[in-house]
Image (cartoon, helix red, strand yellow):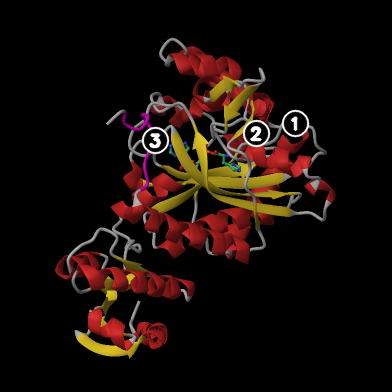
Amino acid sequence: MLTGRPRGTNDILPDEAARWRHVESLYRRTFLCAGYGEIRTPVFEHTELFQRGVGADTDIVEKEMYSFTDRGGRSVTLRPEGTAPVVRAYLEHGLHGQPQPIKLFYVSSPMFRYDRPQAGRYRQFHQAGAEVFGAADPAADAEVIALAAGFFRALGLRGFSVRLNSIGCPGCRPAYRERLRTYYAPHLGAVCDDCRRRFEQNPLRLLDCKRDRALAAGAPSVLEHLCGDCASHFRAVQEYLHDLGVDFVLDPGIVRGLDYYTRTVFEVVHGQLGAQSSLCGGGRYDGLVEACGGPPTPAVGFALGMERLLLTLQQEGVALPVSGGLDVFVAIAGGAGEADQARRAAAVLVARLRAEGVSADMDLAGRSLKAQMRYAAKYPARFVAIMGEEELARGTVALRDMERGTQEELSLGAVVERVRALRAACPD
Ligand code: HAM
């Protein structure tokens, strides 16, 4: 082998891909049903979008971006997250001029962060997310949280919890920041290097430190420092969530690692994920559209990590569909001479079945009939249509029902209908 895959990346093989498809289609259904439209943005963007959008002082921009200069001399970056690109697209296509709110979602979008890989943390990973623009109402915050939680529940996931917080607005946050600085100042000698830097640049992130947890636990709560508007917005979000039957835990330790948040922030965590316990994160970002050059536009959204979600589903033992399975395997019987003729007829039958939406395959490796039957069983194929010398002469096939152990001879034209009728009668 010339080389393995790059560290922190994953191959998704057919069995795993079947589970992804299941999650993706439920996600699409959930958001299409709620009036969201799908958006797909490029895998790379101009670097300044993330510097301005995500925040120059964040871990993502400081340490984790895959940035490079392209052949035209421009700095571009493989997207580390999806919100800033969606904001860019919202502005670039004039969606802000349309009736608001604009509700968008994305699914299985590749994201790139240069971080130390471990279980649940990769350098290329995939996010499903949703972004709502032009809705200041707390009902919008509650809607995205409820949709995310409802989606997890509908998938069969149980051991997750919604952690909710508000980090205030540019009006009330500076005073809280100062309170935090006052609290942390006497402990600066004892905190980690990252926290000393955060103390200067963004004291809220001190609460996020995995190492200095005890200190963070004793810090003044942001919820006691919200201005009147932020406090009433937050109360309303909680009331909506109660009405919608969404359980949540107030957690003033949720501050998020990206700079654009205002007011509501939330994460969905799962106990079995260990260090990488966050399945999903999001919140309100009322200043981002303006920071990207647009008009003042309230916005709220979230993103979930597909790999982490699939990992937790597996850990919880949630049964998801597996790949494989075939409606009809067309097997070729007979000696070399007839087999040639039968092979051509088989290829035509397979194409006809496929065109009719019946999944079908045939031997492409010159196997004996016995080996073909074994190969069909591995799929497993529900029916095997055997084409031999005699059947060919009569314009028929021998259709064997592998589940019932029965066999019948049918004209070539009747096979599709017969398979369809029997297949409909089988449980999925
Ligand atoms: P985030 O918290 O950085 O938020 O990422 C969201 C989710 O992506 C995480 O909860 C996690 O499941 C997954 N994730 C993040 N990094 C990795 C990684 N290295 N490997 C595997 N999974 C990962 C955002 O990205 C925001 N754009 C969310 C948002 C949308 N806020 C508002 N709208």
Residue type, mark 2 in image: Tyr
How far across and down, in percent of the image, does residue 218 sit?
46, 29
The residues bearing labels 3 and 1 have C-alpha atoms spaced at a distance of 32 Å
The furthest residue to the top: 189
Quarter holding residue 344 = bottom left
Q: Residue at x 49, y 29 (%)?
A: 207
Question: Is the residue marked 3 within 8 Å of ligand 1, measured from its CB?
Answer: no
| Earlier sequence position, callout 3 versus callout 1 | 3
The residues bearing labels 2 and 3 have C-alpha atoms spaced at a distance of 27 Å
Quarter holding residue 224 = top right
Residues 191 and 144: in front is 144
How far across and down, in percent of the image, does residue 369 sit?
18, 70
Quarter holding residue 406 = bottom left
Residue type, mark 3 in image: Thr
**Residue 260 disc label:** 2
Q: Residue at x 50, y 46 (%)?
A: 304
Check whether the beta carbons of the residues at disc 3 and disc 1 lie within 8 A of each other.
no
The residue identified by callout 1 is 291
Q: Residues within 10 Å of mark 2 (few under 14, many from 20)?
A: many
Magenta residues, as a range? Answer: 3-12
Check whether the beta carbons of the residues at disc 1 and disc 2 lie within 8 A of each other.
yes
Question: Is the residue marked 2 within 8 Å of ligand 1, measured from its CB?
Answer: yes
Decide: is 293 above or below 229. Answer: above
The residues bearing labels 1 and 2 have C-alpha atoms spaced at a distance of 9 Å
Q: Mark 2 against mark 3, which lies toward the viewer?
A: 3
Q: Is residue 105 magenta?
A: no
